[in-house]
Amino acid sequence: MIRTASDQTTAVAFLGIALFGGVNAIAVRFSNQELAPFWGASFRFAIASGLLFGVMAVRGIPMPRGAALRGALLYGLFGFAVAFGFLYFGLVNAPASVAAIVLALVPLLTFLFAVGQGQERFRGQSLLGAVISLVGVAFVFGEGVGAAVPIISIAAILAGAASMAESNVVVKRFPKCHPTANNAIAMGVGAAVLLLAALVAGERLALPTQAKTWAAVGYLSLIGSIVVFSLFLFVISRWSASATSYVMLLMPLVTITIAAILANEAVTAAFLLGGLLVVVGVYIGAFAPPLDRLLARRPADRTPTLSPVPARATEPGQPASTHPGCA
């Protein structure tokens, strides 16, 4: 239950990620119509990284050092280079709605990775929420949405989801620094690695010639990268990695709705029912008050219970303070 102004701000940021991020898969599909996948991803993140480094210069934001710098580099490797390399490749032949549904696995994977790496305690309610959401995903796929999608595309998107989940854990493990610096470095790493992948794959490195491609790249660079990942770092600094990752379960609802309008992708009853299950799962896993605390509270205990529980410096794998040199 969200009770304070700070909690409300974080929840609004969480919903903002779902709204703006839900459009990303569609924009990537438009970008892939003209730009080769690895090159398109590299181009997007290069623009975003350059703009963020410009903001750092104007505002005097310091570069992270030591462990904070290593964390930003690893965040870029897992969260941008590997994750989006696979996602862009998969979206060449997979519709945006299918990609968004497969990415709904990210919360479950994040939860399992965080518990397995000792960063979070096992929480049955988180697992329950993820499982309910996955039932919704299974229901959608049971309608045959992915029947015509090549298996290699599905495998690529699954690999991207796993890498994205690990990046969530990485962000929580290393010392915090200014989100602008963190994203500038991470997106720069992603742009460099994806450019190398484009060269190895023999992709044509050409600028867009169509207005719709420029519009897609512009959205992906400014809104889909800078805004979405700034909101992401804001939320994950206040919530656990697994709770923050539940935003991936709301994105398909946005993607499917927009895709039905722009990409002529049908919205079926299976999508609607599956989406309802996803929303229920997100509420249980990320927003509902912890059941164990509710059962343990005495009637006279009126202490507010918040969910998700804000990150505590005493929890395993979480930094005690901001790294020196980071604002």
Image (spheres, helix red, strand yellow):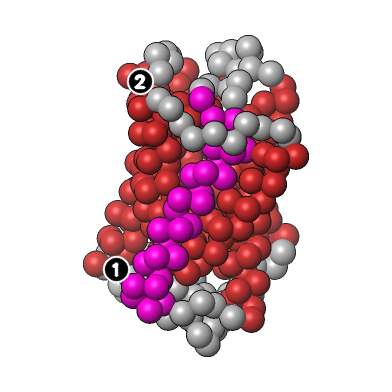
Q: Residue shown at 57%/45% (left/top)?
A: 42
Q: Residue furthest right?
A: 200
Q: For this view, does 233 lie left or right of residue 4?
A: right
The quadrant of the image that shows the N terminus is bottom left
Residue 27 percent across, percent down from the top left = 43, 32
* Marks 1 and 2 close (CB-CB < 8 Å): no
Q: Which mark is residue 6?
A: 1
Q: Which SS type dominates the magenta stretch?
A: helix
Which amino acid does the dot numbered 2 rest on? Leu
Residue 7 percent across, percent down from the top left = 32, 64
Q: For this view, does 310 lie left or right of residue 107?
A: left
Q: For this view, does 41 lie left or right of residue 304?
A: right
Say whether residue 8 is visible.
Answer: yes
Q: Residues within 10 Å of mark 1 (few under 14, many from 20)?
A: few
Q: Quadrant of residue 159?
A: top right
Q: Which badge, 1 or 2, is on the more N-terminal residue? A: 1
Secondary structure category for the residue under label 2: helix
Residue 53 percent across, percent down from the top left = 44, 65
Residue 97 percent across, percent down from the top left = 49, 25
Q: Residue shown at 62%/31% (left/top)?
A: 204
Q: Give the tally of numbered discs.
A: 2
Read off the residue under disc 2.
262
Image: magenta residue range: 34-61
* Along the line of sight, the residue nearer the viewer: 196 or 253: 196
* Along the line of sight, the residue nearer the viewer: 203 or 55: 203
Which tag is nearer the camera, tag 1 or tag 2?
Answer: 2
